[in-house]
Amino acid sequence: MNKKNDEILPNENGQKPSKPKWWKPLWILTSISMVGSGVFTYFFLHGEFVRIIIYEIIFSLVLGGAYYIRVRPSIKVNKLVYIIFGITPIGFGLVILYALICGITNFSTFIMSFKPFGSWLQLGIIIGLFTIGGFIGNWFGKKRDYRLPLSPY
């Protein structure tokens, strides 16, 4: 095991798994469709050039991250993916639930009544809920040994 890249995850046989035949064409077609959608948006939908470039850069970074997660799997990266999974849907769901509770019970007006620090307390509660979501995501990752779903590794 290479400690520099954290632990590279082997498959069940203890060897590095081979990639399927569709692996390379998948990433090539994904990249072509990304560039093609930008060209289509600019010429046919008359989108703003700078906005399209910004979207293409963001999509390229996300695509590169997805490629890295699948090509160089490691426990450290998978742990980060599980924590981000916990923060985004789980933490966001907790914040939505908190907003519903505040809307039903007027709890937010009670929190805001603490005049100098009310808005900071509200922000702290929201950040705390996102943090709880991250801990829940990490807990899910521990239960699954930080192996991603549908991963051949």
Image: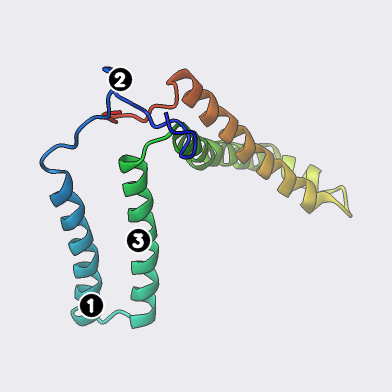
Q: Which mark lies nearer to you, 3 or 2?
A: 2
Circle 1: residue type: Leu
The residue at 38%/76% (across/down) is 51
Coordinates of residue 116 in the picture (x, y in percent): 89, 55
Circle 3: residue type: Phe
Coordinates of residue 24 in the picture (x, y in percent): 16, 49
Coordinates of residue 30 in the picture (x, y in percent): 21, 56
Q: Earlier in the sequence, mark 3 or mark 2?
A: 2
User: Which class describes the residues within 10 Å of circle 3: few (<14), some (14-19), or many (20+)?
Assistant: some
- How far apart marks 3 and 1 lie (CA) works out to 19 Å
Query: Residue beneath label 3, please?
Result: 59
The quadrant holding residue 73 is: top left
Q: Earlier in the sequence, mark 3 or mark 1?
A: 1
Most distant residue in the left direction: 21
Query: Which sits in the foreground, 8 or 95?
Result: 8
Color style of the picture:
rainbow
Q: Judge left or right: residue 84 versus residue 52.
A: right
Query: Residue beneath label 2, please?
Result: 14
User: Which class describes the residues within 10 Å of circle 2: few (<14), some (14-19), or many (20+)?
Assistant: few
Query: Residue beneath label 1, please?
Result: 45
Is 43 situated above or below 146? below
